[in-house]
Structure formats: structure tokens, C-alpha cells
Image: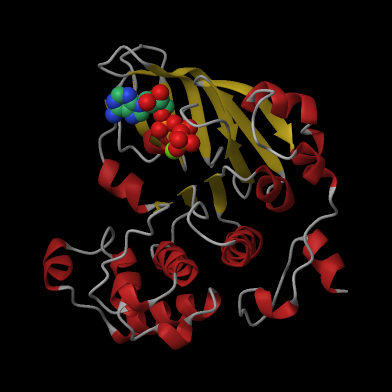
Amino acid sequence: MGAAIEIVHLSKTFGTGKRALDKINLTIEQGEMVALIGASGSGKSTLLRHIAGLMPGDREPQAQLAVNGRMVQQGGRIGRGIRQTRAGIGFVFQQFNLVGRLPVITNVLAGNLGRLPLWRSLLRWFTDAERREAIHALNRVGIAACAFQRASTLSGGQQQRAAIARALVQKAGVILADEPIASLDPESSRRVMATLADINRTDGVTVVVSLHQVDFALKFCRRVVALRDGRVLFDGAAADVSAEMLRGLYGEDSDLDFGALAVPPYRPAAEELPQVAERRLLPPLQAALA
Ligand SMILES: Nc1ncnc2c1ncn2[C@@H]1O[C@H](COP(=O)(O)OP(=O)(O)OP(=O)(O)O)[C@@H](O)[C@H]1O
Ligand SMILES: [Mg+2]
């Protein structure tokens, strides 16, 4: 029912007096893949944390934020039943947030915890079906072979894909990813973005991903929302992002290579893509593989 994410008049003023979000109005429909871009300090992480219900906004009566039709917060107060609401929201962090000493599969199984009765989460007791599902999710993101390694032994890109597998097991209808590729090399970054794009396309999961790399935003996301000083400066199709808007976003002196934006879209090799039985790819990716 309704939009995947609905934000009305959301502001956030920190105790320091810093207004990190300024009257944000934003609707994201189910199945969209949206890039959130903006200079450092523009409010990307703060917005994602509000959407996930990790942080209440300012107590303004009109302020509302709903995910999957469930109230996350209203008037600066976190909604009742936030635990169930959060169970439908996967959060992927720049630092992966895996438990390094535990096997990858255990980390992925943790995606079930939001839905399980408390006694089962405390005992970390999982059924065979849940284990099979975790392996399936790892296969989906291309790292099933690493299932029984300690998470700390994986490369950064593999750890991030394990974190995405955890969100798959969680059966989140919405995945929020806060700079998931910031600490990865270009090759691993492409794989992680291709994995998110595949989940968005194949499963219809709504994805909102904050990115510093504008080229990745334009290649993998159909819609771009640009924040500046806590306000939405641009909201539209990736195809309509202009060098002029980006200059307004990052400043004339930014080290962004605007000329690079003119390069043709990324062409993945078949083996770069996630291992899925039946690949349904973004049209540009299909064209690239043809
Ligand atoms: N807990 C906090 N207390 C005070 N100010 C904060 C807090 N969290 C964020 N801010 C401020 O709010 C603004 C937005 O921060 P935010 O982390 O959302 O930016 P960002 O767009 O994610 O930046 P980056 O690209 O560097 O991750 C910044 O000015 C930041 O200093
Ligand atoms: Mg941030």
C-alpha cells in the first residue's frame, strides 16, 4: 500500500544548533532505486537514520515519516511498533557492521533476528530452512563459497555483499545503504552496486543509497536526490542531472571530474554480476552484455 517511503516536513536540529535537515518532503515509490548525493555534511546519513527510525526529527506537528505504510515517526516522536517497522528496513553501512569473529553465515542469519521471538534470538537458534535461505542469499550476492569463513577474513567488498545478504534474509522491503562503497576499490564498488541493482530489479526491493561517487549514482540509479545544507536541491531522473547542478552541489572548487560524467555507462563483464539463477538485469546492463 502506498509509497515505500513518505517524508513530510521533516527537519532535524541538533543540540549544537546545527540544522541538518530542513523541511524535507520526499516520496519514494515501491521498487525505486534512488541515489542520495550531496557534499560532506549535507545531511545524507542524518536523513537515512531518520528513515530507519534510529533518530527522531524536530518536534514539529506536521512532521511525518512512514515506511511501507507504517509510521516511523510523527511530530518528532518515534512511532509505536517501531521494532516491527524496522524489521522491514535493511540498513547497510559503510563499515559493513558484521561480527568479524563469527562465520559469515551466522552474520547473515542475524537478518532473521528482528522477526524472531526473543528466546530464539537470545539462543541464536535457527532452523534448517533458515540456514538454507542464508546460503541462498549468499549465493545470490556471489559469495556462497565464503559462508563458513569468519567474516573478518573476507575482503571489504565481500563483507559488504554479506551485509546485503543479511538484508535479503531480513526480507526487508526497503534497503537503506549509507555510502556502502566508500571504502571499496572501484571493482568491488561495481560489484556491490550491481548486487543492489539486481535485488532492486529482481525482487522489487526499494533501495536508497547514499553515494559520494556521482558516476556510480548515475550508472546504477534511475532517480537522484541531491541534498545541500539539509535541503533537497534536486530530485529527478539521473538522466537530468547536469554538470551545473553538480557544481551547485559540490562547489566550483570540488575535485569532482565533471568531464568524466560524459563517459559511456559502465559495461560489466558477465562474471561481475551476482550469481542468480535467472538474471533479470537493468536494461543498460542487458545491453552491455548483449
Ligand atoms: N549527532 C550529531 N550532533 C551534532 N551534529 C551532527 C550530528 N550528526 C550529524 N551532525 C551534523 O549534521 C550535518 C549533516 O551530517 P551528516 O552526517 O548527515 O552529513 P552527510 O551528508 O552524511 O556527510 P558525509 O558525506 O560526510 O557522510 C553535519 O553538519 C554534521 O556535522
Ligand atoms: Mg554520511
At 62% across and 30% down in the image, what residue appears?
226
Q: Is residue 65 left or right of residue 75?
A: right
Q: Where is residue 199 shown, x and y percent of the image?
A: 58, 63
Q: Is residue 33 above or below residue 271?
A: above
Query: Which corner quadrant of the figure contains ligand 1?
Result: top left
Q: Where is residue 109 shown, x and y percent of the image?
A: 31, 72
At 80% across and 33% down in the image, what residue appears?
240
Q: Is residue 274 left or right of residue 88?
A: right
Is residue 202 in sight in this rendering? yes
In-front residue for pair 168/159:
159
Q: Is residue 3 above or below residue 87?
A: above
Q: Where is residue 280 shown, x and y percent of the image?
A: 72, 70
Way the structure is coloured: secondary structure
Quadrant housing residue 117: bottom left
Q: Is residue 206 above or below residue 248?
A: below
Q: Where is residue 161 shown, x and y percent of the image?
A: 48, 68
Q: Is residue 267 left or right of residue 10?
A: right
Is residue 47 in sight in this rendering? no
At 81% across and 55% down in the image, what residue appears?
265
